[in-house]
């Protein structure tokens, strides 16, 4: 059952946390930030990056809720945060499985029939996959540094991250252990699939091109995990005018951390032009 979370100092009333038990067997931790204003009933559902979880969004979900005047749902995918472990190795379709099965189960369990998706990195890819499969429910997508295909720059960066994790007294390993109950298994699965030779063929451009809701794609110019070709090809795959791009200077792979105010302003402005679709 949801309950007010007493562990967030300074949080406004309406912060709720809980665990959703899904038909697939997953138990996913979730957190609602209740900040809807009249006329803005459609909530935002946030999808974290490949090594993220609820806590690693930091205070950005609260800022997003305050800026947009909307309820915001944050959750940790299976294997992440305090959610249940992922059984076995990941396949090349792990993002498809999340978009087509786990996320719909969670949304149904929480009673969401329509929503705006906000995804970062792997979460941005999952948002696009879900939007293409569930057009009646997904009214808009904001994707930060999404992956549509595998680039050498991404493989190289993940290889460097893998080396950092394996180093003696790794700060990365100890840091992830603070946020994930199954940190070691998670990192092995995530880095293992991204570095697998067969994953180099992974590509969701066709599925992303089937999205029919408004899309805002944001990427840092100094993104170490992907070039601007990712969001440029997303825009090219969609009908003219459907996808807006925002490129941020002095920004790497996590725009919500490197340039949070710029991201909030871009999302707010984008909703100002498409908000009539998201009531």
Image (cartoon, grey):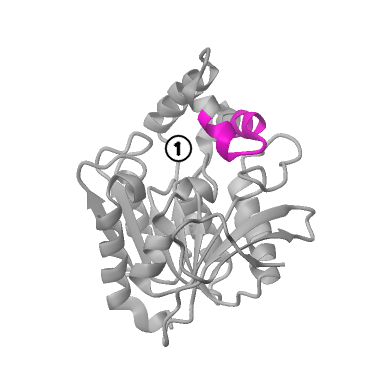
Residue that sits furthest to the left in the current view: 249
Task: Report if residue 126 is visible in the image.
Answer: yes
* Residue 120 at x, y percent in the picture: 44, 50
Front-most of residues 29 and 137 = 29
Residue at image location 78% in from the left, 56% down from the top: 24
Task: Identify whether 61 is placed above or below 224.
Answer: below
Q: Main secondary structure of the magenta part?
A: helix
Disc tally is: 1
Image quarter (top left, top right, bottom left or bottom right) of the C terminus:
bottom left
* Residue 222 at x, y percent in the picture: 26, 37
Quadrant of residue 18 in the image? bottom right
Quadrant of residue 94 in the image? top right
Residue that sits furthest to the top in the current view: 168
Q: Is 251 displayed left or right of 109 in the figure?
A: left
Residue at image location 65% in from the left, 46% down from the top: 82
In the image, which residues are magenta? Answer: 175-190
Q: Is 202 displayed left or right of 58 in the figure?
A: right
Front-most of residues 179 and 219 = 179
Q: Is 57 displayed left or right of 136 in the figure?
A: left
Judge whether residue 185 is colored magenta. yes
Residue at image location 30% in from the left, 69% down from the top: 268
Judge whether residue 116 is colored magenta. no
Front-most of residues 103 and 213 = 103
* Residue 75 at x, y percent in the picture: 58, 56
* Residue 90 at x, y percent in the picture: 67, 37
User: Crowding at label 1, few (<14), some or many (≥20) Cα neighbours within 10 Å?
Assistant: some
Q: Mark 1 highlights which residue? A: 150
Q: Check disc 1 and report its element: helix, strand or loop.
A: loop
Task: Identify whether 51 is placed above or below 269.
Answer: above
Front-most of residues 256 and 212 = 256
């Amino acid at each position: 059952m949801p309950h007010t979370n007493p562990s967030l100092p300074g949080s406004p009333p309406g912060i709720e946390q809980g665990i959703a038990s899904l038909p697939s067997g997953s138990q996913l931790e979730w957190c609602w930030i209740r900040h809807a204003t009249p006329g803005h009933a459609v909530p935002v559902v946030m999808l974290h990056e490949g090594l993220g979880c609820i806590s690693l969004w930091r205070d950005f979900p609260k800022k997003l809720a305050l800026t947009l005047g909307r309820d915001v749902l944050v959750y940790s995918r299976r294997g992440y945060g305090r959610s249940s472990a992922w059984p076995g190795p990941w396949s090349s379709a792990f993002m498809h499985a999340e978009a087509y099965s786990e996320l719909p189960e969670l949304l149904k369990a929480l009673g969401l029939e329509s929503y705006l998706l906000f995804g970062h990195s792997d979460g941005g890819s999952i948002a696009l996959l879900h939007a293409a499969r569930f057009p009646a429910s997904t009214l808009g997508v904001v994707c930060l540094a999404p992956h549509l295909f595998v680039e050498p720059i991404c493989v190289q960066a993940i290889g460097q991250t893998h080396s950092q994790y394996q180093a003696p007294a790794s700060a990365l390993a100890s840091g992830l252990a603070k946020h994930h109950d199954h940190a070691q298994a998670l990192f092995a699965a995530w880095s293992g699939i991204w570095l697998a030779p067969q994953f180099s063929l992974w590509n969701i451009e066709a599925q992303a091109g089937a999205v029919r809701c408004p899309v805002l794609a944001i990427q840092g110019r100094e993104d170490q995990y992907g070039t601007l070709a990712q969001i440029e090809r997303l825009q090219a795959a969609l009908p003219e005018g459907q996808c807006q791009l925002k490129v941020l200077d002095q920004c790497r792979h996590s725009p919500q951390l490197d340039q949070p105010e710029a991201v909030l302003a871009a999302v707010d402005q984008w909703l100002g032009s498409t908000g009539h679709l998201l009531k």
